[in-house]
Amino acid sequence: MKAKSIKGKSTEEISSALNESMTDGFKPTLAIVFISIKQDREAICNLLDEKDIQLFGATTAGEFIDGEIEAGSTAILLLDINPAYFKIEFIETSPENTIESAKKLGATGKETFTNPSLIIATGGIFIDGDKIIEGIIEGFGKPSADREITVFGGMAGDDLIAEKPLVFTNGKTKDNAIVALIIDEDKIDVRGIATCGWKAVGTTKTVTKSEGNIVYTIDDKPALDMLMKYLGVDVKQDQNKGIVTFQNSWYYPLQLERENGDTVIRATRFANSEDRSLICTGSVPQGSKIKFSLPPEFDSIETVVTECESIKDNTEQQADALIMFSCVSRHLSFGALIKEEIEQVQKVWNAPMAGFFTYGEYGKSKIGTNEFHNNACCVVALKEK
């Protein structure tokens, strides 16, 4: 399998780069498209559609190929993968029906290949990523020693407007939807990891009241007040009423401790100034043990690179293509240093890469569990067997 990455800030630039990529006889069958809402998505999709290239796409909060980071542009990974080795599925959903929609996807994956892997992107603002993972696993069925499903991916972005992130494929686009690339792992080796590097601070606390992704109280105190008190965070509130966007939360997420010893991050994207609750991008079960987090330091990048190296069978192993889903919080926190993280991760695999800055990530943690993450870097390496 051969792969090439291209980018552009206009339809004309993408058209030129696409044609140039094919001058040596390269005939891509699949395009992984990460695109700003500022770009002419329909025109670029038409360019690819005209060349019989199947699309897996999401809008972004920034996009990149290799180590070249852009904003307001389009990044595309082109692959000449055998069409028999993959299938693209597009499922419309809603915040109320997320689990049922994800169950359909898990069942479709099971029916499509004996050993499927899913690369997914989800649209919308209020989709609960935990329910996506829960539904896929339930739809696929209980894993066995010789059969399980692997999920990697990200939540679409919309340049931090937080209104209508989109996912799309050939002839279909929507905000509340799931687009999935189902890959036959008997033909394509799919391996990846979701890693973070954020460090917890303070003592363990208990979520004493929550419902889904809304945290009302922590240690029996209003969750918003606890966050503001312990981290010194100020939440700007419009007329001190209602739900407000809490973008500073990207820097101060909650660390949720799982019973299996794993830890996942939960960003608190919105705050409710009336009931003093925090609205997270994923579920936080009542009774959960949590810690607060401070913005990451430089050694967080070293942690990410080390964990990416850990999924290789040997130091010489390479990949045909690389996809990265990196939380926009990493870009906001690291600033220009995020370029170094992206470059170092690519060097681990030495393959053409495309990625985007997301509103949430899906992937296996270092202990091998499918999870929904925030503030993480999710890396997927593809290699034809």
Image (spheres, grey):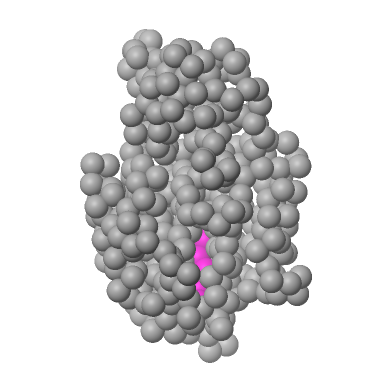
Q: Quadrant of the C terminus?
A: bottom right
Q: Residue at x 24, y 52 (%)?
A: 100
Residue 309 in view of the camera:
yes
Q: Quadrant of the N terminus?
A: bottom right
Q: Left or right of 16: which side holds 50?
A: left
The answer to which quarter of the image holds residue 129 is top left
Front residue (pair 29, 75):
29
Q: Residue at x 50, y 65 (%)?
A: 76
Q: Left or right of 115: which side holds 189?
A: right
Find out whether residue 78 is within the magenta segment.
yes
What is the magenta range? 74-79
Q: Looking at the image, is 263 positioned above or below residue 174? A: above
Residue 256 in percent (x, y) is at: 52, 35
Q: Residue at x 38, y 22 (%)?
A: 209
Q: Looking at the image, is 51 positioned above or below residue 100? A: below
Kindly report the secondary structure that dominates the magenta region of the rendered protein.
strand
Q: Left or right of 100: which side holds 250?
A: right
Front residue (pair 152, 256):
256
Residue 172 in percent (x, y) is at: 27, 62
Front residue (pair 61, 191):
191
Front residue (pair 96, 290):
290
